[in-house]
Image (spheres, rainbow, N blue to C red):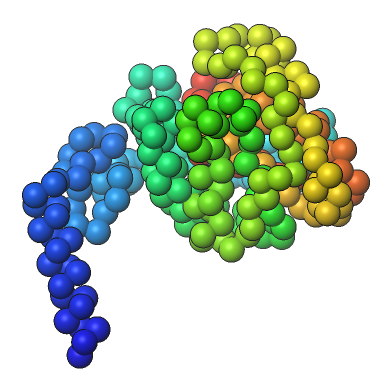
Amino acid sequence: MMKTIVDHLRAFWNSLADFLFPRVCVTCGARLSTGKRFVCTCCEQDMPLVRYPSFEDNPMARRFWAFPAFVRAFSFFFYQRGSYKTRILYEFKYHHNPQLAVYMGRLLAQSPTFQGFFNDIDCLIPVPLSVERQKERGYNQSERLAAGISQITGIPVENNVVVRVTDNPSQTHLTAMERCDNVRSIFALTPHADALRGKHILLIDDVFTTGATLVELSAVCVQIPEIRFSVVTLALASYTFYSQ
């Protein structure tokens, strides 16, 4: 009886809060219905999901085929610069909204397109930020994505296995070749990496454009003996090469 009363009161206050302080969708600006967070139902249904038929053989995965330790790679949705879907990325990356990143990680992990993807993964490793960048932003958006995935899958997040040793400039306006040069030797393993011998790790980042950052991180992680690795990102740049 008491639980029912509390549930009704909570629903009442949530409805009142939505009326007095309406929450809006981060992508289209429409008012969110009670029970929805960050993204409205229409925008969730309109998400341009990645639907490659294979986790192991797709344009994203092919960037890692040179590594014998590679297992699979996938992304949640396609994006183009200027598309309203990029607002999701800008919101949690530049507008101090880490809970949106957690929410999107949960959506990704629950998506039917990822069925079976997380099988036999031992731990999640988000792409690390430099100390300076994380202090400036207040959080690591890739770690927040990993936290959301972990909440659904139960796979632990490991934040102390690899560190960023160089605070390299932003990749946003660089060419593919410049991106490769920009990320060279920016990561290093810590002594905690020894515990991952023989494990299957999942590398996590927010956006896959040329893949330069994740390829560089993979090159460092494969130094761990008997390691296997997979890759997942929230968004995949829908340039012609990647959408073939």
Quadrant assignment for the N terminus: bottom left
Quadrant assignment for the C terminus: top right
Residue at the far right in the pictured view: 225
Residue at the far bottom in the pictured view: 1
Where is residue 162 shown, x and y percent of the image? Answer: 74, 38
Question: Looking at the image, can residue 62 be seen?
Answer: no
Where is residue 58 shown, x and y percent of the image? Answer: 64, 36
Residue 243 versus residue 125 in the image, above or below = above
Question: Looking at the image, can residue 205 be seen?
Answer: yes
Q: Residue at x 24, y 84 (%)?
A: 3
Front position in the image: 57 or 88: 88
Where is residue 92 shown, x and y percent of the image? Answer: 41, 35
Q: Residue at x 59, y 63 (%)?
A: 154
Q: Residue at x 20, y 78 (%)?
A: 6
Front position in the image: 30 or 163: 163
Residue 7 versus residue 13 in the image, above or below = below
Where is residue 229 shown, x and y percent of the image? Answer: 75, 45
